[in-house]
């Protein structure tokens, strides 16, 4: 998914605690290549890159990480105990003595304090490294989650380690466009775009791909998921860990799985939360299409919830009537943007985030209700671009695009994209074309494409891996978790049934968290795959003037 919207339950809790919201933007997903004939042959990591990783890891272990104060811009409001540093990795692992780049790292040492018994000392278990997904999301905030009650047991036993992957933030940052011109608003969001609109978006995709090459130069090709996995092994060594304890969310599950396949003997424990499908035939074009179909189902869930709370939101007593209310708002915004900045595109972006997190349902429904009843301010506050986040959003989008375009072959014929998305939009109009536009630069990408690694491990090659998934997750459709489970021998899947929040570790579901704690703290996994009842749906709240009378 697109980095700007990618946060697991852990990230959502943390951001709520900090009174901050995930950056705006249009989520995409792990996306996948078009394979009209035989699947692409998988490619094993090159011997030169494997040797280069070993060289870089040995150097990192010798050097360690010199932790010091965290830059305020990188981890604002850093509590005492959280420190930051850098680790050097090769830009190109085939040439470990060549150009080096630095990845920023943050760490909070294990408290070793039992949150339920202050007199009891908890043994330290090492470092827990977290990646929130993307590609393009930074994990530098992760150590702050140790202050959240549900995470204090984990923070007692583990050093909480976050980092910014290559390209993100100060970690050899990528850029494809001028941040000052990154947010364009208001924008359109046609669910059935005209030929003229399609031509415009093709031209923009070509220009964006050229901008990536012009602004990033020859280093652009080295921003890949395989290199993210290699970087993770160097970080492990720099932390003086013989074996890695890793937790990845969403896209983080993909390169976590790559790591498991490439370095199985270096894995201690691994949690893959909101697992994506690592099938090389789906990296990344086809999983994009699957995600768009899944978002249609999740949009239907949201509309059904709004309809059941018509007494609060006054948007219609059936999902069809809620859809008409949304369409009416989109048409009005096309004629006159709210606050001069919120058009149909910004409305769609705001509601797409509700497809990721149920916690967003009340605020989105309230803002839509208020707008249709004459008060645009809640919608403007919710959906208008924030110029102060433009640089971060541009960087995240650049990394997202570079990694996914580099990772795998994509269709280079616009007619393939047009055919596939036109067909899908007939039954799944909500997200299909927006998702296509997000990824279309990959059709015109100037760098060579890799062949995805076929992720598979045999019995006994890998310690048990804990896979977590919500059954109705739209951003990482559930079949991806099933595929991940089949490919990692000995892995165990915990499913939150009839739920759709993207990322469930450390959230409000006590059953899910019980399995998480048992695994991370004691190394125990369920004897067989486990199911958890869904969390409670959010309560309807007449916020922001949403309970205004019908017009």
Image: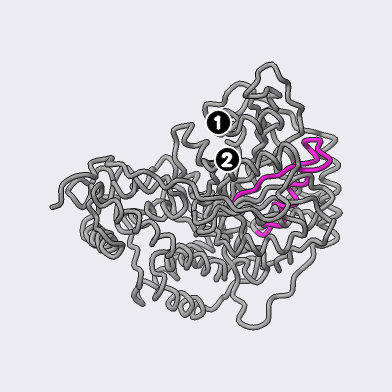
Q: Residue 352 sits in which quadrant?
A: bottom left
Residue at the spot 64% in from the left edge and 57% down from the top edge? 220
Q: Which secondary structure, mark 2?
A: loop
First in sequence: mark 1 vs mark 2: 1
- In the picture provided, is 74 more to the left or to the right than 346? right
Reading the image, the residue beneath label 1 is 148
Towards the viewer: 124 or 37: 124
Q: Is residue 328 magenta?
A: no
Distance, label 1 to label 2, CA atoms, is 9 Å
Rendered location of residue 195, percent (x, y): 36, 77
Q: Which residues are magenta?
A: 221-249
Q: Which secondary structure, mark 1?
A: loop
When the figure is inspected, residue 281 is found, relative to residue 360, above or below; the finding is: below
CB atoms at circles 1 and 2 under 8 Å apart? yes
Towards the viewer: 181 or 169: 169
- In the picture provided, is 135 more to the left or to the right than 448? left
Q: Is residue 247 magenta?
A: yes
User: Is any atom of residue 3 visible in this view?
Assistant: yes
What residue occupies the far left of the structure in this picture? 551
């Amino acid at each position: 998914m697109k980095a700007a919207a990618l946060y697991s339950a852990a990230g959502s809790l943390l951001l709520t605690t900090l009174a901050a919201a995930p950056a705006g933007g249009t989520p995409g997903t792990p996306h996948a290549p078009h394979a009209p004939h035989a699947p692409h042959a998988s490619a094993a990591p090159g011997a030169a890159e494997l040797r280069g990783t070993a060289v870089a890891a040995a150097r990192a272990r010798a050097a360690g990480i010199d932790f010091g104060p965290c830059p305020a811009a990188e981890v604002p409001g850093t509590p005492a105990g959280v420190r930051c540093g850098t680790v050097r990795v090769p830009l190109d692992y085939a040439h470990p003595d060549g150009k080096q780049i630095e990845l920023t790292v943050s760490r909070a040492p294990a408290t070793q304090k039992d949150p339920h018994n202050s007199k009891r000392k908890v043994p330290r278990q090492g470092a827990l490294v977290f990646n929130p997904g993307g590609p393009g999301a930074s994990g530098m905030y992760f150590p702050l989650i140790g202050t959240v009650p549900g995470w204090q047991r984990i923070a007692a036993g583990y050093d909480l380690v976050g980092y910014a992957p290559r390209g993100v933030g100060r970690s050899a940052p990528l850029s494809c466009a001028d941040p000052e011109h990154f947010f364009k608003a208001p924008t359109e969001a046609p669910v059935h775009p005209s030929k003229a609109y399609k031509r415009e978006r093709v031209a923009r995709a070509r220009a964006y791909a050229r901008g990536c090459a012009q602004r990033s130069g020859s280093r652009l090709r080295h921003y890949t998921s395989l290199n993210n996995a290699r970087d993770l092994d160097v970080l492990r060594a720099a932390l003086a860990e013989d074996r890695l304890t890793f937790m990845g969310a969403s896209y983080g599950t993909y390169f976590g799985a790559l790591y498991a396949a490439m370095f199985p003997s270096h894995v201690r424990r691994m949690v893959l939360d909101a697992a994506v499908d690592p099938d090389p035939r789906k990296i990344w074009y086809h999983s994009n299409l699957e995600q768009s179909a899944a978002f249609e189902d999740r949009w239907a869930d949201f509309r059904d919830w709004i309809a059941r709370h018509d007494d609060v939101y006054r948007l219609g007593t059936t999902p069809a009537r809620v859809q008409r209310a949304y369409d009416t708002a989109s048409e009005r915004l096309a004629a006159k943007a709210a606050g001069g900045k919120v058009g149909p595109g910004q409305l769609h972006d705001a509601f797409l985030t509700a497809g990721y997190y149920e916690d967003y349902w009340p605020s989105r429904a309230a803002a839509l209700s208020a707008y249709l009843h004459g008060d645009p301010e809640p919608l403007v506050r919710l959906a208008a671009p924030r110029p102060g986040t433009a640089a971060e959003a541009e960087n995240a989008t650049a990394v997202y695009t570079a990694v996914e375009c580099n990772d795998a072959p994509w269709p280079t014929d616009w007619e393939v994209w047009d055919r596939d998305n036109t067909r899908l939009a007939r039954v799944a109009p909500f997200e299909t074309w927006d998702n296509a536009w997000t990824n279309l630069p990959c059709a015109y990408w100037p760098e060579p494409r890799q062949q995805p690694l076929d992720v598979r491990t045999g019995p006994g090659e890998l310690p048990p891996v804990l896979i977590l998934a919500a059954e109705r997750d739209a951003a990482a459709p559930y079949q991806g978790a099933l595929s991940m489970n089949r490919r990692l021998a000995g892995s165990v899947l915990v499913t939150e049934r009839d739920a759709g929040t993207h990322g469930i570790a450390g959230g409000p579901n006590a059953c899910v968290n019980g399995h998480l704690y048992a695994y991370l703290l004691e190394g125990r996994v369920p004897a067989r795959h486990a199911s958890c009842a869904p969390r409670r749906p959010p309560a309807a709240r007449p916020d922001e003037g949403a309970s205004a009378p019908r017009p």
